[in-house]
Image (cartoon, rainbow, N blue to C red):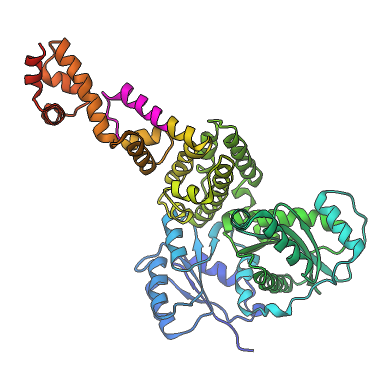
């Protein structure tokens, strides 16, 4: 069998040597890796040789990893790249996604299993997955009891090693919203019933537990290969039921039923890692151990559930919780990007659910929202994302009519109380946690004019009182009512009243 080829591009000698030593390339049917020290050197190699996979650092001299990928795409658009990430910036990760890079490795947490899991799938035939016999009453009950936390006896499986696969659609909440809970649940139940393995569907959360044979020997390489083969077979079957993107968490191998509770926990922890690994991944528990401390998954789920409850009760504390979700920091731009996409999707589903409870139709929800989910995911900073979700609170937590009235009344109150300061549409929108385009549209709809001229009219109203009742100089009045200069004040005053401030004072003295 022809051996496969890998290229490693990194300007650090220690990183290149780690790739040489950490993986048993021969056992994976690969030649020893080829190395390059920068993007330009790698591009020359790619132009004359074929590589099944390319691992590249981002920050390198002469040509960085982003330019290497972009230039390679021009003549080898399907070339598989894996980013070797080490404290990279958020925008690097976003650009890499746009260039079609789906996998990344954090240098400091790199393991043999993680690299091997990226090398093996390329040669796997997903039709060759081995599985356990169809549901057997006793063992199916053991699996169900393990999922529910009940005690189970110790009985051997018919194969040497078995692993638990926890399967979940990445877009489960939005599927339920668009298609209806009953339809989605029916699809998942049918998918579970027709999967030829020991399988239990935990209805209501979109998670399906499956048991598969994943090893005849103690070889970790055999286990990883069998795991990815089985996962691809699962995805092929899921496509028949239009379940979209599927993430799969896989436990370590077990030999008997007594290991099922631990396997359930491991598979759940592996699936949780999609928050930072990204969607549509097969994630092995034994590959995530170095990364588990990157994120407190229980806390994230607690915050998301707490936000939903506070949102329902119209509690302003929800705003601080959203800030906490968006203040998490990672050592990798890819982890940042995947995390924010996960959080955005979860909060988006919450918005839709609560808006419907408050009487909004499907169409009106999206008419009111100034951005799509893709727009939010593409925002430049996490602060912008957080602001978007905080701004939606004022739109959807109350009834539609009451919310609009509150926004307008609060806007008028802010203008009346702070007209002497530097206030603007953006300032007011931020203060009300609403989006400025939504506020602008709503204000004009209710008041018949834009906010900027309304603020000017309020300032001129107060300037008139000062001109009539005080001896303040004109520039002092201009400054007192919030104009940046006397000249601008005079121009606006004449536009509103038809006469200059001096003429107005003489007329009303």
Q: Nearer the viewer, residue 200 or 190?
A: 190
Q: Nearer the viewer, residue 74 or 13?
A: 74
Would residue 353 be seen by someone viewing this image from the given angle? yes
Check the image and report above or below for 109 versus 32: above
Q: Residue at x 60, y 64 (%)?
A: 245
Write the start and end of the magenta stretch as one range.
407-424
Residue 414 counted in the magenta span: yes
Which quarter of the rendering shows the C terminus?
top left
Which quarter of the rendering shows the N terminus?
bottom right
Q: Residue at x 54, y 59 (%)?
A: 106
Residue 194 counted in the magenta span: no
Residue 428: percent from the left, percent from the top? Answer: 36, 33
Q: Nearer the viewer, residue 21 or 443?
A: 443
Q: Say which quarter of the image contains residue 90.
A: bottom left
Q: Residue at x 48, y 75 (%)?
A: 35
Q: Main secondary structure of the magenta part?
A: helix
Residue 410: percent from the left, percent from the top? Answer: 40, 28
Would residue 38 be seen by someone viewing this image from the given angle? no
Residue 298: percent from the left, percent from the top? Answer: 66, 44
Check the image and report above or below for 97 versus 422: below
Residue 343: percent from the left, percent from the top? Answer: 55, 49
Q: Say which quarter of the image contains residue 434.
A: top left
**Number of on-image labels:** 0
For residue 413, side relative to residue 124 (left or right): left
For residue 206, side relative to residue 462 (left or right): right
For residue 491, side relative to residue 78 (left or right): left
């Amino acid at each position: 069998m022809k051996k496969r080829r890998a290229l490693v591009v990194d300007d650090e000698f220690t990183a290149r040597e780690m790739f040489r030593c950490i993986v048993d390339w021969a056992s994976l049917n690969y030649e020893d890796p080829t190395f390059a020290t920068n993007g330009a050197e790698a591009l020359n190699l790619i132009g004359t040789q074929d590589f099944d996979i390319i691992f590249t650092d981002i920050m390198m001299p002469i040509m960085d990893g982003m330019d290497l990928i972009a230039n390679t795409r021009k003549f080898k658009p399907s070339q598989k790249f894996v980013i070797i990430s080490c404290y990279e910036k958020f925008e690097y990760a976003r650009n890499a996604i746009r260039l079609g890079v789906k996998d990344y490795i954090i240098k400091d947490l790199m393991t043999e299993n993680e690299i091997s899991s990226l090398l093996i799938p390329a040669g796997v035939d997903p039709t060759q997955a081995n599985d356990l016999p169809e549901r057997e009453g006793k063992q199916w009950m053991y699996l169900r009891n393990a999922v529910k936390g009940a005690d189970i006896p110790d009985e051997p499986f018919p194969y040497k090693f078995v692993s638990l696969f926890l399967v979940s659609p990445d877009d489960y909440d939005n599927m339920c919203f668009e298609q209806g809970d009953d339809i989605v649940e029916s699809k998942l139940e049918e998918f579970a019933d027709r999967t030829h393995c020991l399988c239990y569907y935990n209805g209501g959360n979109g998670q399906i537990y499956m048991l598969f044979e994943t090893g005849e020997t103690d070889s970790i390489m055999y286990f990883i290969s069998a795991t990815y083969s089985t996962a691809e077979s699962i995805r092929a079957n899921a496509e028949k039921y239009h379940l979209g993107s599927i993430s799969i968490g896989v436990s370590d191998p077990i030999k008997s039923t007594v290991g099922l509770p631990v396997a359930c926990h491991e598979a759940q922890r592996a699936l949780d890692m999609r928050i930072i690994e990204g969607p549509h991944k097969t994630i092995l528990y034994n590959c995530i151990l170095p990364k588990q401390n990157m994120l407190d998954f229980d806390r994230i789920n607690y915050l998301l559930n707490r936000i939903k409850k506070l949102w329902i009760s119209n509690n302003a504390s929800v705003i601080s919780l959203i800030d906490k979700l968006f203040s998490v920091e990672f050592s990798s731009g890819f982890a940042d990007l995947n995390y924010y996409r996960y959080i955005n999707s979860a909060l988006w589903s919450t918005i839709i659910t609560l808006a419907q409870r408050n009487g909004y139709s499907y169409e009106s929800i999206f008419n009111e929202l100034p951005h799509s989910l893709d727009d939010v995911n593409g925002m430049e900073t996490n602060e912008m994302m957080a602001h978007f979700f905080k701004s939606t609170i004022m739109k959807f937590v109350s009834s539609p009519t009451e919310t609009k009235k509150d926004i307008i009344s609060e806007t008028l109150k802010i203008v009346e109380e702070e007209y002497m300061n530097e206030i603007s549409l953006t300032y007011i929108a931020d203060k009300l946690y609403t989006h400025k385009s939504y506020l602008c549209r709503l204000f004009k709809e209710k008041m018949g004019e834009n906010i900027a001229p309304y603020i000017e009219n309020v300032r001129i109203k107060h300037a008139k009182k000062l001109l009539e009742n005080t001896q303040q100089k004109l520039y002092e009045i201009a400054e007192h009512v919030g104009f940046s200069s006397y000249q601008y004040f005079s121009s606006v005053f004449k536009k509103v009243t038809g006469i200059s401030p001096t003429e107005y004072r003489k007329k009303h003295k």
